[in-house]
Amino acid sequence: MRHSIAGALLALALTTVFAQDVVTPNPNLLADGIPAIPKTIADKVALYTEFRGYGFVGWHPVERSMLVRHREQGANIAQIYWLKTPGGKPEKITDFPDPVSAVSFAPKHGNYILYGRDAGGNEASQIFRMDLGTRQSTLLSSPDERSAYTWSKKGDRVLIESEPLDKTAQGGTRAQVTTTLALVDPLKPESKKRLAELPGGGWGGFAFTHDDSTLAAQQYRTPNDSDVFLIDARTGAREKILPRDGSPAAGFNGFEWSQDNQRLFLTSNQGGEFSELAVYDRRDKSLTVLSRHIPWDIENFSLSADGQWLVAIANNNGRDEVHLFDAVNGKELARPDVTAGSFGGGQWHDAQHSTLGFSLNSPQSPGDVYSLDSKTGKTERWTVASAPAGVKPETFISPELVQIKSFDGLAVSGWLFLPDAVKFPGKRPVLVSFHGGPEGQSTVRFMGRTNYFLNEMGVAVLMPNVRGSSGYGKTYLDLDNGFKRKDSVKDGGAFLSWVGTHPRLDAKRIVVSGGSYGGYMSLATAVDYSPLIRGAIDVVGISSFVTFLNNTESYRRDLRRVEYGDERDPAMRAFHEKIAPLNNAASITVPLFVVQGKNDPRVPYTEAQQMVAAVRKNGVPVWYLLADNEGHGFRRKVNADFEFYTTVRFLEKTLIE
């Protein structure tokens, strides 16, 4: 008896000690097949999970103050703050369990704000008005729809653009989708009036003329195929203006009106490979290009309220360049003195017309907020990002550009981060990280937690921009569409082969990773190139284009069919079935780590679930992490931290041990 009691006490003591030595996932996480994560990992990586930068959100319309996004110490997600002076103490405005989006002061007076917020990562954004005095919120949109908003120029109304959700559809899906436009006075939600029903999805970019009589709008299909409409803000009648009849398909984005309401500034790739800054004149229906001398995509731009200044951001091979234009004559001015980095925001102050607000991050900074005086060309720093003691972001590694030839001779490029050669001599293991999109791009920016791989584990990070990536021209962008899907996977294979030619990289120790479409790339690479890699990480990735297209939200389905191919066509469906990682799971012979959000409307969790089951049939180890309060990627720090601990352990077991 005494022995059994002693044994039980010893077992309890050992269990308690063991529990203290491992990291327990929080109740919202399902860790299936994942071995115990030692607490020593959490302790080691802790410093790399505490970078806290700032992002510019928007100016106050009258005062020289702004809204910024920031995660305070100990918080789970970023919130919105009111920063009233450069270097001042931010005042917390929001305190919600989910991140907010599209936040702005009310125009003209700034007495309240509007914001969008979803629940648990489901992307079904709702629009709210918050009174700054009471911090009380009022719902302006329908809870059964996914909504966004656009302010009128007068500031007395907002346009709410809404798309229906499958949960409200009979049978859980929709054959036809419409986009509803409604006008509402935010102070009188009962005043909401329907303006128009637009056919299909992909509508956006709404911009009122200065007299609020007309809206510019875009219907997007692909980056190389969209239409521009003018919509009567009183009747809802619409007129297509671009591309003109007889002109080829082209991409158009980002609408801003001149003061006389006759010229519409936008970007277009109609005249060449890249998106160029252009202006459409309503009087003679002409389209004039302003930035042909810049041989890169203009990613975004902003026009000052007085119509004098225009800032445009060019994507120079993954690096942001700031260009300043005289909006009246269309001529570029001297380049402003803006520190190199990944540019965010970019909004002119409504009252101080020559003042631009923006944020910058870089490999050496998690992000800060600045203002630019376009008259003097000088910048002013408003915030100082936080990094934990013991970590010096200013010493972090910058990447080098890699350019190789793929299987068919096509030039493809990527970014390579190499660990310090003194601290980590010899050939280094490699993490190959594919971006999502697929029309995304790996760019030069702050790498956050990834710096732990470089600085503490000595793992090199290679980020390819395979065909289909943005930033390299519209021809390159379309090289992976439809039946050409596997060509991008072959580009990934070319990078795996290239690793063996680099004197500092170990071709025998490679793990591939990716999120969303990058998750598909990781899975497809594991199918085709398992002998060349040691493991694969799939974050919210597509395992079968047929099941993905059947189960993604209806408002996205037709848009994705243009990129991936229409699964209703027998030949395309047969191709999809042939290339699906799900249907080729037997070829995956390396360990797999799958991460998924239960509420993901883009890539439903069933894509992960079915892939996990298929690969496990091979007897291959599969780690599966599912969060029931996340969507398309983990936004809550507590979840992202556990995902990172697990990723570190996965890399230790596949690349280091």
Image: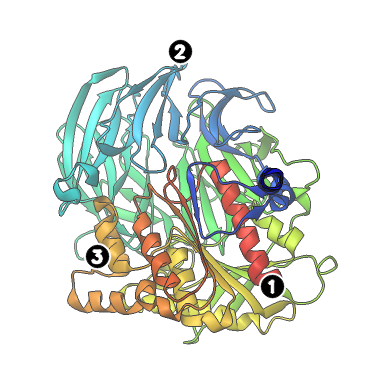
333 or 431, nearer to the observer:
431
Which badge, 3 or 1, is on the more N-terminal residue? 3
Residue 273 in view, yes or no: no
Let me know if residue 27 appears in the view.
yes
Q: CA distance from mark 1 to mark 2?
A: 54 Å
| Of the pair 461 and 34, the residue shown nearer to us | 34
Amino acid type at mark 3: Ser
Question: Image height check: is 374 above or below 21?
Answer: above
| Left or right relative to 619: residue 284 | left
Q: Quadrant of residue 289?
A: bottom left
Query: Where does label 1 land, which residue?
Result: 429
The x and y percentages for residue 449 are: 65, 52
Q: Position of residue 90 (x, y in %)?
A: 62, 25
The answer to which of marks 1 and 2 sits earlier in the sequence is 2
CA distance separating discs 3 and 2: 53 Å
Mark identifier at residue 134: 2
Residue in view at x 37 percent, y 47 percent? 599
Instruction: Give the image quarter of residue 504.
Output: bottom right
The amino acid type of the residue labelled 2 equals Thr
